[in-house]
Image (cartoon, rainbow, N blue to C red):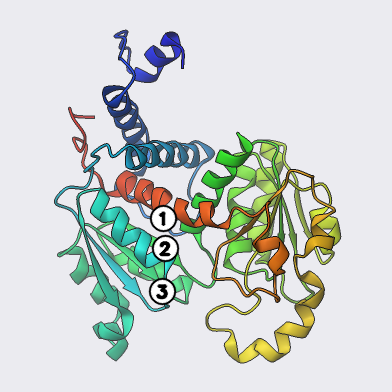
Amino acid sequence: MAISEAASEIGRGSSAIVPLGSNYLSVRLQNALWEAHQTLAGRDLLHFSDLTERELEQLLRLSQVLKEAQKTHFTHRLLAGKTIGLIFDKSSTRTRVSFEVGMLQLGGHALFLPGNQLQTGRGEPISDTAQVMSRYVDGVMIRTFRQADVETFAEYATVPVINGLTDEFHPCQLLADALTILEHMGGLRGVTVAYVGDGNNLANSWLQVAPKLGMNIRVATPPGYKPLAHVVEEAKFHAVHNHTQVLVTTDPMRAVDGADVIYTDTWVSMGDEAEAQVRLPQFERYQVNEELCKLAKPDHIFMHCLPAHRGEEVSEEVIDGEHSVIFDQAENRLHAQKAIMAALMADAGAFGEDL
């Protein structure tokens, strides 16, 4: 980076030249946190409808700098003394590990709270649990089934609430996905993402986030498994504003043709296991395999949020092939979620001088 660019990174009218190295990283980290803190501190992240394009970009920038801090062993205890409660009604690998490790790296503490061990499992109202937990912790992450339950919790909580996954939305995953695409493509604007499979929480979140970040989004699902209609309408509204494209179709080839990114997810999500025998035959022609991938750009990347079922929604050749970035994507859950926690939960003076 040129010196002039380095000076501009300092921001807030400073003209000092900061040397490259850990001091320079600290300035960029403080600026990134300060920018995100201005509008996101104390807020909830339940889905992407409430976030502007600028706020999403701020979270991505903070994710990038936090990733650099972690990779270079730069201490970044932005949440020292803070505690987050992690409520899990659904099993998890990536969400649990990344939130717990991320909070530790940020200097705070995470409490793992299985939903069946809380009093909500015995009938306590969500509103009561939210108000009680707000007296104990500085933030709450919830991974559950109904979006309405997360929204009720957030309504009564007085601390930030983060949606770790519901049947309707998965914002933490999508922020990590956007970071992964940014790293591999060098930018987001104009990138075309083809999502093939079930019109589930991932499809809904893709439709919310892609138009705001200047990406084209195409969603191909079997008839009867389309994403939420109001989410599609919202996506089209933002697409017009940002001059991007939104396509919802039942034709996987039309979705993948010329795409930069091919994305899929399991055909049978948690809670849908009883429908497996009905679902699988209807999804057969939506498998992401080498034949389908030939329609995408030669330098496309393949993404999957994991866990994957090789031989069902994706062939082994694709998920384990040269275009697959699934483990970069999984790693970025850590950095993206650290950005979310820091932006929502940090104090104004969390890093260095008052922000």
- In the rendered view, would you say 219 is above or below 34? below
Is there CB contact under 8 Å for labels 2 and 1? Answer: yes
Q: Quadrant of residue 115?
A: bottom left
Q: Is residue 227 left or right of residue 48?
A: right
Q: Is residue 174 visible?
A: no
Is tag 1's residue or tag 3's residue first in the polypeptide sequence? 1
- Asked which secondary structure carries label 3, the reply is helix
The residue to which callout 3 is attached is: 149
- The residue shown at (42%, 75%) is 144
Q: Is residue 150 visible?
A: yes
Is there CB contact under 8 Å for labels 1 and 3? Answer: no
Q: Quadrant of residue 302?
A: bottom right
- Asked which secondary structure carries label 1, the reply is loop
Q: Is residue 196 left or right of residue 139?
A: right
Task: Nearest to the eye among marks 2 and 3: give it.
Answer: 2
The residue to which callout 2 is attached is: 163
The residue to which callout 1 is attached is: 45
Mark pair 2, 1: CA separation: 6 Å
- In the rendered view, would you say 190 is above or below 353? below
